Image: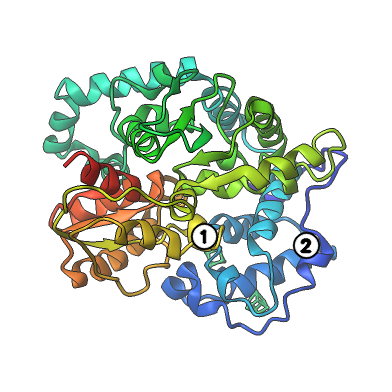
Amino acid sequence: MAASDLTQIGAHSEAPQQKDLDKCVHCGLCLNSCPTYRELGMEMDSPRGRIYQMVQVAEGKAAITDTYIEHMDLCLACRGCESVCPSGVQYGRLIEAARAHIDQNIRRPWHVSAFRNFIFGTLLPSRMLLSLAGAGLFLYQSSGLQKLVRSSGLLKFFGRLHEIEMLAPSAEAPFFFSQIGKVFPAEGEKRYKVAMLAGCIANVSFARLNEATVRVLQKNGCEVHIPQAQSCCGALHVHAGRKEEARKLAKNNIDATLDGGFDAILTNAAGCGSTLKEYDELLEHDAAYRDRSIAFKAKMKDINEFLASIDIRPPAKPLNMTVTYQDSCHLCHGQKIRLQPRKVIASIPGVTLKEMALSDLCCGSAGIYNVVHNEMAMNLLKNKMQSVNATGAECVVTANPGCMLQLQAGVKIHGKEQPVLHVVELLDRAYRG
Ligand code: SF4
Ligand code: SF4
């Protein structure tokens, strides 16, 4: 896209705020925690370099050029830089604003716009369309066509399609959409009444994970509600700079859960949780939803965070396996949750946790980043798998469906096809013996 194609549209600017930009003192302490800087060694692909470019645009000294867009797009939004920044720079907020500002100020080629509008505006919020897409994927995978395509080697002739196809999620029939609107009773004494947000694509591709989450919660005395009116959380929209669509989804999820008298509102997806907990920032200028979004945030919990905060009922039988844990970026950097998943793992008798080096460095998943920046994502995955393999663990555990997909490709390409599980699935296995 040429800079000359840039068109100023939209009245309300989504641009990074000066007060947020000013927090950066350009010390560079974040550089070594940045996966793209570690990979490329380029200042402009480091947190400090990206913030510098944002400042230039904010002060009108530089325009939104193709180069600027490329450097912003190549960021994983993993927020690894945020965790180490001594000045408290909220980098996640900055990159989301920079992308929204780009989206607000450029005119994309019509077919790109149409594709983005369909994915973000039509497909992700629609249960019916996601079910149809899931059914198509299920047919492709269960008919043997996927096996045939993979073994033919045909995809190798289409750029990186071979690598991208390896990252395709499985369609897990029956989809979890059929459980939406239901209430699952607590096992034994009812201790909590909780709502579970089941995601969007996860209803198709992580249906078994969602079921395991419900079972684990029931086992721990929770009455689990899957509110009927819930929708996609809007995380992918925020990361793509489409904040207006995300705001609509946020209001919908707040209305679907907040007045239900729940002790907690839960998600098993770290990427979703990070955005769900930031609805208050998304709606900070919305007078009708400002207070409701703050109340929602207070109840919103990641499943690991919730389980670690209650007395987990210990599984009766040991699992006897070694596992290594990959910190999902949006759990450890976005939500500052590191100890809780480890506490849940430690609660399972027989499980030994072998920590990998740099467990909090991004695996390259980052929403749809591994599709749109596949080469960088696969390089990061290769490094990640070296750390995983060095532990000798029999199983890789993490806390986000997107990371699970990336690591599943990793164990196939660089590993020993070790199982990749969510923390909750590990606990569920222990409960089920
Ligand atoms: S983001 Fe933080 S750590 Fe990085 S250069 Fe700025 S002040 Fe330093
Ligand atoms: S969010 Fe991740 S990729 Fe982006 S600048 Fe920060 S550390 Fe680097």
- Please tell me in which quadrant of the rendered image residue 187 appears: top left
> Which of label 2 and label 1 is nearer to you?
1
Q: Vertical placement of 255 versus 64: above or below?
A: above
Q: Are marks 2 and 1 in contact (CB under 8 Å)?
A: no
- Please tell me in which quadrant of the rendered image residue 69 appears: bottom right
Q: Which residue is mark 2?
A: 57
Q: Vertical placement of 423 versus 44: above or below?
A: above
- Residue 344 disc label: none
Q: Nearer the viewer, residue 251 or 226?
A: 226
| Amino acid type, label 1 | Cys
Q: Which residue is mark 1?
A: 78
Check mark 1 vs ligand 2: CB closer than 8 Å? yes or no.
yes
Looking at the rendering, the quadrant in which ligand 2 lies is bottom right
Residue depicted at x 35% and y 61%: 326
Check mark 2 vs ligand 2: CB closer than 8 Å? yes or no.
no
Residue depicted at x 28% and y 33%: 170
Tell me the crowding category of disc 1: few under 14, some 14 to 19, or many 20 or more residues within 10 angstroms, Cα based.
many
Q: Tag 1 or tag 2, which sits nearer the N-term?
A: 2
Q: In the rendered image, which quarter contains the C terminus?
A: top left
Q: Secondary structure at mark 2?
A: helix
Can you give x and y, in whole percent of width and height, for residue 80 in the image? 52, 67
Can you give x and y, in whole percent of width and height, for residue 362 in the image? 42, 62
Can you give x and y, in whole percent of width and height, for residue 269 in the image? 46, 44
